[in-house]
Image: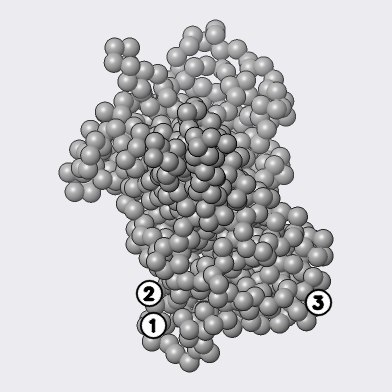
Amino acid sequence: MSSAQSEDTELFAKAARMLQADGLPGVLISNRPWRELAIEAVTHLQTTKVPIYVRHGQLVRIQRKEDGTPFIDALTDATLKGILGRSMNFVKLMARGPVHVAPPDNVVKDILTMGEWLFPPLDSIIEFPIFRPDGTLIEIPGYDAVTRSVYVPLPSLKIPPIPEQPTDEDIMNAQVLLDEAIGEFPYENEASHANAIGLMLTPLIRQSINGHVPLALIDATRPGTGKSLLAETVAFIATGRKAEMMTAPYDDDEWRKRIASTLSEGATIIIIDNIKAKIQAASLDTALTSSTVKERILGQSKNGVYAQRATWMATGNNIQIGGDLPRRSYWIRMDARTDKPWTRGGFKHNLHEWVPEHRGQLIAALLTLARAWFAAGCPKATVPQMGSFQQWADTIGGILSHCWIEGFLSNLNELYEQGDDDAQQWAVFLRVWHDFYQNTPVLVSTLAKDIKTGSFDDGDTGLGVAGLYNALPDEVSDTKKGDFKRKLGKALSARIGTQFDESGLHLIKAGSDKRSGAVFWSVAGLQVSQDAIPQKEEISYIPTPLEGLGGGLSGDIPLENKLDPEENKPAKPANLQDVQGLAVDEVGHPLQHFQIVMTPQGEGFITVNLPRCVNVLLYLSQEEVSFRTEGEIAQIQPLHQAAGPDEWPYTIASLTDEHILRLGYPSRAALGYPPPSPPLDDLQ
């Protein structure tokens, strides 16, 4: 062998040793395409099982903060270069021989821009054992392909064995231990206590639910009742550390940024603490019903997409919620029944000390309840309907019912009523609008101008526009902040066709301005098919103040005939489908206003005749009665013929002009009718 060959052999042997240094794989930087070097480096990362994952088109890893909190960290050029340098040897042949070099920047950039990798996909981090959808338990730390999550428990976590088939005694012992943790909070009712246990179970079964999880509202009558302590207890059991509290932003843009920032780190517990103002944000509503959240990455021109698998909580005193949030929440209400709840004492445990010491046993207790339900075949329970949260409600409700814990979600209706203030405000606003403008379409600019004018009327609702200002919903109540006209227009557009109460009043677009294209708006009532109404003549109407009738509807009194007499033809018999829920005569015609009728509660005359809303003024009691069921409405029968166009409809002797005015209806003289004829004996 020549000396040159000997040198080459020694050179290659040295290079081979350097490539395998420290038992790591190696990449030889030689005269070949960068793509081959990048593929070789990625192959080494995969075969050596370096913990790199793919999350929505990005390479990520799991890191821990100073307090031990695990979080998902997107790989940058620098972090990937460091991982490559620690995971393999890069060797380059130089003139003086092979040398170790840093991973080439071109190789690093090429790996990051591949777009498709064979690393496992990652949705979330878990810090405690959880159930898969099939009921099996994730107990071994590391990556789980079924739930696409990584189990990274604290080294100090020790969980007692969970029985495969929990007995009744196991279930009772588990409940006793959980009661030591959360049993002394002053729950307002049985439902709040059951919902609190459901909240504790939620992080453990979150990954087994394909649907969404609602927001837990932890609410109290006074400060110092224990709202935040309950949220911290749930969070500590789930994560092993104190919870990170998020304050509620004041605008939707900030909500969106904070939600995305929190989810980008793979958060499993999110607490919105000490809410002061009304909580209403479209971004929060969307996040609660989404599997992913998309937001622009700070400092970059691209969007990040983050999995949303968190358990959400919000705390506050007498929390006010608006928008769609009431139907995306469940309620844990506390009432210590004292003016200074923070002065209470005599509790069995200091939870700040006791919960960390017994975290493993508390997790085991929760897992025992859940496993008992899975082992029993997941028996169904009767729970309220919750739309996109139904799988969560069925699962938690099934576990609690199987373990004899009653009351879960039984306070939902109270929450809906408490949180329906937004709908009530809009209902009032539409009534005032309808009373002021009647059926006249108006531009947003006109409406905004009238509202602002009303703000200077010192509450004198007699001026009309002040009524509009005073009835403004909270969402648009600040007429001086920002572009009020634009904000008002957006609020109207978001509520087209929405009926907020039984009156049926709702917003419609009534055309547009031909020159500017601006939209005209109007408030319409319940739509009754015109085929169901006898069309004897075209009539002008004036509203009558029938406050309290049919949810604020106004009655209509004919003013004048607009058609020639020969055009007044009998109406065609009504289609029964068109008059469903109306009071009708023997041939199916809807009964007219002031038609004399016999009702289940006595004789009177009709003031309102709308689908499932027939109001009658009774003669004897002079009381306005509303009939809403089909059975009651079917019993309403006409006693006399309806009045003709020139005949005054009030044919009861007791209904004098003075009495009519006192009831709030236009008098005979005001409407231009002839004086009353002598009273008929059979009508007295």
Q: Identify the image quadrant of residue 674.
A: top left
Element assignment for label 2: loop
Query: In this view of the protein, which residue sits in the foreground, 235 or 138?
Result: 138
Query: In this view of the protein, which residue sits in the foreground, 501 or 105?
Result: 105
Q: Which residue is mark 2?
A: 223
The residue depicted at 52 percent of the width and 43 percent of the height is 10
User: If you read the primary sequence from the N terminus, does the residue marked by circle 3 or circle 1 appear first?
Assistant: 3
The amino acid on which the numbered mark 2 sits, given as a three-letter code, is: Pro
The answer to whether one can see residue 585 in this image is yes
Please determine whether, in this image, residue 370 is positioned above or below residue 49: below
User: If you read the primary sequence from the N terminus, does the residue marked by circle 3 or circle 2 appear first?
Assistant: 3
Please determine whether, in this image, residue 161 is positioned above or below residue 110: below
The amino acid on which the numbered mark 3 sits, given as a three-letter code, is: Thr
The residue depicted at 29 percent of the width and 12 percent of the height is 515
Element assignment for label 1: helix
Crowding at dot 2, Cα within 10 Å, few <14 / some 14-19 / many 20+, comes out as some
Q: Label 1 near label 3: C-beta < 8 Å? A: no
Q: Which residue is mark 1?
A: 342
Residue 662 appears at what percent x and percent y?
40, 46
Crowding at dot 3, Cα within 10 Å, few <14 / some 14-19 / many 20+, comes out as few
What quarter of the picture does the C terminus occupy?
Answer: top right
* Residue 167 - label: 3
Q: Label 2 near label 3: C-beta < 8 Å? A: no
